Structure formats: structure tokens, C-alpha cells
Amino acid sequence: MWNQVYNPLNNIVLSTIAAAVPVATLLILIATGKVKAHLAAIIALIAANLIAIFVFTMPANMSIRASLLGVVRGFFPIGWIVLNVIFLYRLTVATGQFDLLKRA
């Protein structure tokens, strides 16, 4: 069993900055507009894994498994919403109500 170390650098400020690097990476890449959002998310995920493994001494297999669990848990709610939106769109087109929605 791995025990999480909250202050691996023995400095609260540096440890907090290290933990914030993936979030800052994601926001900066998206804000610049040069990198598409999905690629920025992948880059931030890689940065998060590297920091977890090398700074916070998390075992690599555990870090990768945690990342995969996050991806799976994120895709299911988003996929469910997209599936329902596609269903509602097709339903409104098939019943002719989409034209009514366009006029409104």
C-alpha cells in the first residue's frame, strides 16, 4: 500500500506549486489558443502523471490506473449527455418539431 506524501519537497509552497503545474499547464495551453483543448488535456494528464510519479513518489502503475479511472469516469457522464442530445435531435427532426424550434 502506498501512503500519499503531501509535502514531498519539505516546503509547502514548492509542493503546492508542483501540484498546481498540471492545472496551470492545461489553462495556459488552452488560453494561448495554439493547442486544441483535447491535446492540452492529454499534455496536462502526462504532466500530472510525471509529477505524481517523480515528485510525489506515487508508483507508476498506480498513477496510470488512476488516470484511466478518471478518463472512464469522465467519459460516461459526457457520453450519456451526448447520446441523449443526439436522441432528442433525431426525435425532433423525425416529428417535424425541429423547424418549430428553429423559428423560436
Image (cartoon, grey):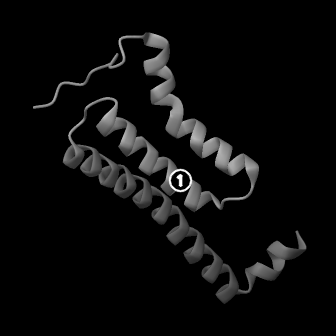
Q: Residue at x 43, y 53 (%)?
A: 74
Secondary structure under tag 1 reads helix
Instruction: Indicate the amino acid at tag 1.
Output: Ala
| Image quadrant containing the C terminus | bottom right
Relative to 86, say whether 74 is above or below.
above
Q: Quadrant of residue 50?
A: top left
Above/below status of 28 relative to 97? above
Front-most of residues 13 and 80: 13
Seen at 35% across and 11% down, the residue is 10
Q: Mark 1 packing: few (<14 Cα in 10 Å), some, or many (20+)?
A: some
* Nearer to me, 41 or 60: 60
Q: Nearer the viewer, residue 69 or 81?
A: 69
Which residue is located at x 82 percent, y 82 percent?
A: 99
Residue underneath mark 1? 41
Residue 54 on image: x %, y %: 32, 36
Q: Quadrant of the N terminus?
A: top left
Across the whole image, how many numbered discs are drawn on residues? 1
Q: Is residue 69 left or right of residue 80?
A: left
Task: Please give left or right for residue 38 compared with residue 66 in the image.
Answer: right
Residue farthest toward the top in the current orientation of the protein: 11
| In-front residue for pair 63/69 | 63
x, y percent for residue 60: 23, 45
Q: Residue furthest left?
A: 1
Is 19 left, or right, of 96 in this rendering? left
The percent coordinates of residue 101 (x first, y second) are 80, 73
Residue 19, position as x, y percentages in the image? 45, 29
Question: Residue drawn at (50%, 48%), measured in percent from left and top?
Answer: 44
In the rendered view, tell whether residue 21 sits above or below residue 77: above
